[in-house]
Image (cartoon, rainbow, N blue to C red):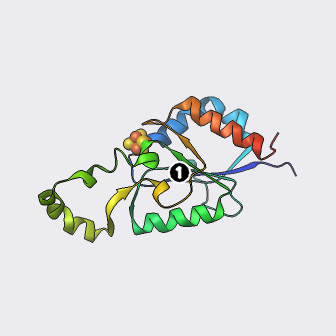
Amino acid sequence: MERKLKAGLFSFTGDEGCVITFLEILNYKLKDWNGRVEWQAARVLRKKSSLEGLDVAFVEGAISNEKELEKLMEIRKNAKKVVAIGTCAINGSPSNHRNSFDEDKKREIKHILKRFNHMPSVEPIGKYVKVDAEVPGCPIIEQKFVEVMEQYIKEFGVE
Ligand code: SF4
């Protein structure tokens, strides 16, 4: 059976603008990637979420609660490569605005953070796991996403 790149797309804290851009990319790359890429985890494509044998995990969003952190660790454990897509995943911004709130504001939102099991700060994924590549931009730069995908298609020996 022909080898396909097993890819996943995951979203954490952000506005999913990068996922929307990903869908725009598929408008012109879907046909080309169809025979070479198997999306085995991508909520936006209504794929069942399987991490087993994942080659590349594209991760959007920052980490703001324990549940996200657990999922991120699980993704890292399973994926051979992890790619941070968008500035939220790369450096936390703009999803990390609450990190710079003054003490009064932080006190004001404390009960909300507790209620939703949020962590004291919002952090980029690189704070917790090794990141192999980045796709910059807010939202992501389309061309850069395509380049990273093509690079892994080659690296994993998919023709
Ligand atoms: S990087 Fe920008 S577009 Fe992407 S999820 Fe964050 S806020 Fe949205």
Q: Position of residue 66 (x, y in %)?
A: 41, 69
Q: Position of residue 84 (x, y in %)?
A: 53, 47
Tag 1 secondary structure: strand
Determine whether 3 is above or below 150 in the image.
Answer: below
User: Which residue corresponds to the image point at 82% horizontal and 49% vertical from the top-left?
Assistant: 3
Q: In this rendering, would 26 be left or right of 109?
A: right
Q: Residues within 10 Å of mark 1 (few under 14, many from 20)?
A: many
Residue placed under numbered mark 1 in the picture: 59
Q: In this rendering, would 155 be left or right of 60?
A: right
Determine whether 140 is above or below 39 in the image.
Answer: above
Q: Position of residue 55 (x, y in %)?
A: 70, 54
Label 1 beta carbon within 8 A of ligand 1: no
Q: In this rendering, would 27 be left or right of 60?
A: right
User: Which residue corresponds to the image point at 46% horizontal and 65% vertical from the top-left?
Assistant: 69
User: Which residue corresponds to the image point at 58% horizontal and 33% vertical from the top-left?
Assistant: 144
User: Which residue corresponds to the image point at 15% horizontal and 57% vertical from the top-left?
Assistant: 105
Determine whether 42 is above or below 72 in the image.
Answer: above
Comparing 39 with 150, the one in front is 150
Comparing 61 with 134, the one in front is 134
Res 35 visible: no
Comparing 159 with 44, the one in front is 159
Indicate the quadrant containing the C terminus: top left, top right, bottom left or bottom right. Answer: top right
